[in-house]
Image: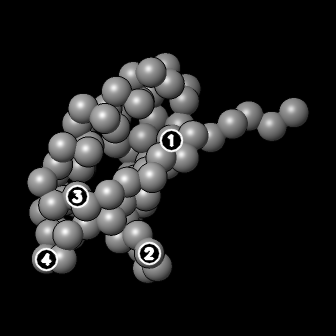
Amino acid sequence: METLYLLIECEVGHLDEVMRRLRTIPMVAEVEAVTGPFDLIVKLQAERINEALDTVVNRIRRVPGIKGTETLVTVSGP
């Protein structure tokens, strides 16, 4: 199982709608509002890294109200 975290910056006034839409995407495990330079942190889980990245590019980044994203891919320790 692959895990990615996505940091999302939303357009002003769109936070609730973006959260609602993200929660409908099958690989999205968690969506939380955060403070700081980003508005949301999203946890994605997929069988393969390519599936997760495809979801980021073709589903999540197309959600109306998302201004920008940063993707963090987890890595296994030793």
Dot 3 or dot 4, earlier in sequence: 4
Tag 2–tag 4 contact (CB < 8 Å): no
Q: CA distance from mark 3 to mark 2?
A: 14 Å
Q: Which residue is mark 1?
A: 4
Mark 1 and mark 2 lie on one chain; the one further toward the N terminus is 1
Instruction: Give the spatial CA distance, label 3 vs label 1.
Output: 18 Å
Badge 3: residue crowd in 10 Å (few <14, some 14–19, many ≥20):
some
Mark 2 or mark 3, which is nearer the start of the sequence?
2
Q: Indicate the secondary structure of the residue bearing disc 3.
A: strand
Q: Residue placed farthest to the right in the image?
A: 78
Describe the colour scheme in one phrase. Answer: one colour
Q: Residue at x 25, y 66 (%)?
A: 10
Amino acid at circle 3: Ile
What residue sits right under mark 2 in the picture?
37
- Residue at 25% x, 61% y is 67
Q: Residues within 10 Å of mark 4 (few under 14, many from 20)?
A: few
Q: Residue furthest front?
A: 68
Q: CA distance from mark 1 to mark 4?
A: 26 Å
Which quadrant would the N terminus be assigned to in this image? Answer: top right
* Front tag of 3 and 1: 3
Measured as percent of width and height from the top left, residue 16 is found at 17, 69
Q: Which mark is residue 13?
A: 4
- The secondary structure type at the circle numbered 4 is loop
> In the rendered image, which quarter is residue 38 located in?
bottom left
Q: Between label 1 and label 4, give the one nearer the viewer.
A: 4
- The residue that disc 3 covers is 66
| Amino acid type at image mark 2 | Pro
Between the residue at mark 2 and the residue at mark 4, the CA separation in whole angstroms equals 16 Å
SS for dot 1: strand
Q: Compared to 29, does 26 lie above or below?
A: above
Residue 70: x and y in percent read: 45, 52
